[in-house]
Amino acid sequence: MVFKRTKSIVGLDIGSHAVKAVEMSLVGNEFVLTEFGQAQVYAEGSISDAINEVMSSCRFRTKRVVTSVSGKSVIVRYLNLVQMNDDELKNAIRFEADKYIPFDVDEVVLDCQRLDDLDQAVRVEAGQDAEMRVLLVACKRSLVEDHFGMLTGLGLQPEIIDVDAFALGNAYEFMATGGEAIADDDRVVALIDIGANKTNINIVRGTSSFFTREIYLGGDDFTGGISKKLSVDLHEAELLKRDPGDQIEDVKDAIFPYIDDIGNEIRLSFDYYENQFDREVDEVFLSGGASRLMTLEESLERIFEKKTSLWSPVEYLKSSDRVDRELLEENAPQLAIAVGLASRLQVA
């Protein structure tokens, strides 16, 4: 019997409440989801235990992982620079970075990437000087080293350390090219991933990222609101959030102000993008563990006045026979970042 050669990698999304893992394999010339799983983080300091649990309980083919960082130690900036080649850009970026990041350049890991600029041709036709858009990412070196050390200490082989918001964009692009490819390159989509204690925003036009932001509001705020309003402990509030039963109206009243808070913060980001680029956000896609909260989809659509819906990062992705497809689809909204990390198999 002849077997196709396979190359695999695990996208490892390390959240504050759960660790999600998705294994992508290249089977012949085809990308296939070959395993996935998740484990709860039960207490602060138990992240290593959760990673161990998910890696040991699933039948992953590899120890190679792609993971990501986020938070206030990660700085993302979009720069407009004069045209230069890649070697010149690498030399210039350290000097440019000093203008835009609040840390000493020697304390950070820097990376940059030239971005496709959909408006450049228009500017050239108008006789304006051509510039290039460059994505600058800086992360505290200590955070990267701690992350790397934790993973290698668990016997894993980290290949790439990404940023949450860009993993989200990669998942969207990977999903789109696997199914109905993004037909309208000029369409503006806002990807909103709502986790336990933060919300990631990535506004993409075609397949190019134009704006990212982290908002430090999430599912924990909904839980806290239920706890406070209904005078129950956080554990019971979490259960009511997931299944309110006959207390549905009380739970709706408790979470409504917090949905408004998150929605208004996201809308401020839309306003900034739309004013900066003179383009409206056309559609909003929701993901993340807290995205399935009852009434959230319709409430945010009301706030944004834009089509808003949950999306599945695995909708068009082929999976192996050993993957429980029904369970995969059920968990899909919270796997978006992990899928985006695993999609880096294309370059890892």
Image: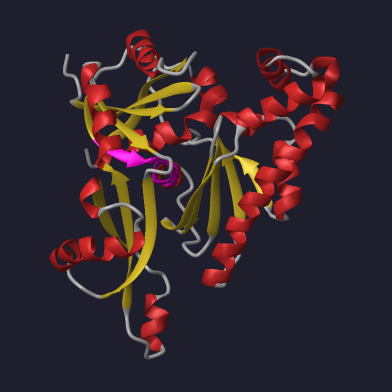
Vertical relation: 49 (above or below) 94: above
Q: Residue at x 54, y 63 (%)?
A: 273
Report the magenta residues as a range.
160-169
Residue 94, image x, y percentages: 21, 60
Q: Residue at x 70, y 13 (%)?
A: 236
Q: Is residue 150 left or right of residue 294?
A: left
Vertical relation: 310 (above or below) 150: below
Q: Is residue 275 left or right of residue 47?
A: right
Residue 55, image x, y percentages: 33, 14
Residue nearest the viewer, comparing 92 with 274 = 92
Query: Does the magenta portion include 167?
Result: yes
Q: Is residue 282 visible?
A: no
Residue 10, image x, y percentages: 31, 26
Q: Residue at x 39, y 18 (%)?
A: 47
Q: Residue at x 78, y 37 (%)?
A: 256
The image quadrant where one finds the N terminus is top left
Colouring:
secondary structure
Magenta segment, prevailing SS (helix, strand or loop): helix
Name which quarter of the figure residue 237 lies in: top right
Query: Does the magenta portion include 144?
Result: no
Vertical relation: 317 (above or below) 166: above
Q: Is residue 277 left or right of residue 322?
A: right
